[in-house]
Amino acid sequence: MSSPIVLAANGLKKSYHKDRIDVPVLRGVDLEVREGEVTALVGRSGSGKSTLMHLLATLDRPDEGEVLFRGTRIDNAPRATRDRYRNRDIGVIFQFYFLLPELSAIENVLAPAMIGKSVWSYLKSRNEYRRRAEAMLDRVGLLHRAKHRPSEMSGGEMQRVAIARALMTDPTLLLADEPTGNLDTETGKEILQLLTELNQNDSLTILMITHDDEIAAGADVLWRMKDGLIETQQSARNEPLLATSAA
């Protein structure tokens, strides 16, 4: 029996405007992400992967089509609903981390809790939130770096902090846009190992965008994208993500 569909894209189209010319990026994308699985979206630069990720995360809106979270349309929902979706239901990590440079590691991890609550609500539960943030840093192996700022950390450490931040609100789904793209090979393997453990041990559902066929081949489901369309889809994970990437 198939797992429930957590996230779905139906007929997504998106164009951008340049000098009065419409440049189509997505031409009608259909995609499904099922609970408990690692889904990989692979394609070359310019194929539309990151644009699709932004639409799935409701960071942008499609020109046509719809995004559904657990069967309910989310892309055209009121702003407050979309904000809650991004802050509670999904976690997002990017290639370039996007940590706030003036904040320490633990403060960056705490950011979703601070954003998602009123000042009074946050202050009332701040000790609980801090314990949660410490637990997330410990989960990614960086509790000892809690007081360090991004400028004092390596690329791999910053990505681990970004993952801890994404996990802070206990999301249903993790969206990972080229999570190893800005890292050296060995550090990239460590991040893939961490994502694999989160999926296998914590049953975290993951949608990962990558241009690397070796990484994508280790997913439960692989969707291949070309010229703004889903070209092929295949199932069945043969090896863990780390083993595949190290081949």
Image (cartoon, grey):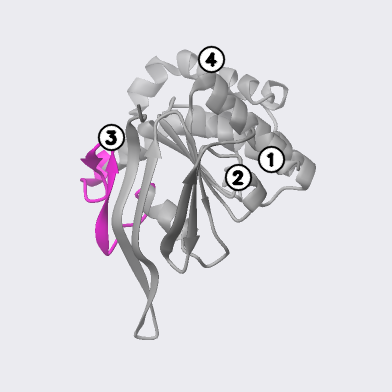
Q: Position of residue 199 (x, y in %)?
A: 54, 27
Which residue corresponds to mark 2? Answer: 217
Instruction: Looking at the picture, tell me which residue is in the foreground, 17 or 232.
Output: 232
Could you tell me how far apart the alpha carbons at marks 4 and 2 are, in whole angstroms? 36 Å
Circle 4 or circle 3, nearest the eye: 3
Given contact means CB atoms under 8 Å apart, are the residues at marks 4 and 2 in contact? Answer: no
The magenta stretch is: 57-81
Q: Could you tell me residue 164's position as x and y percent?
A: 57, 30
Say the numbered circle drawn on residue 131: 4
Find residue 244 and name its label.
1
Q: Where, quadrant-wise, is the C terminus in this rendering?
A: top right
Q: Which mark is residue 70?
A: 3
Q: Earlier in the sequence, mark 2 or mark 1?
A: 2
**Residue for point 60% across, 45% down:** 217
| Numbered-mark total | 4
Identify the element where label 3 is drawn: loop
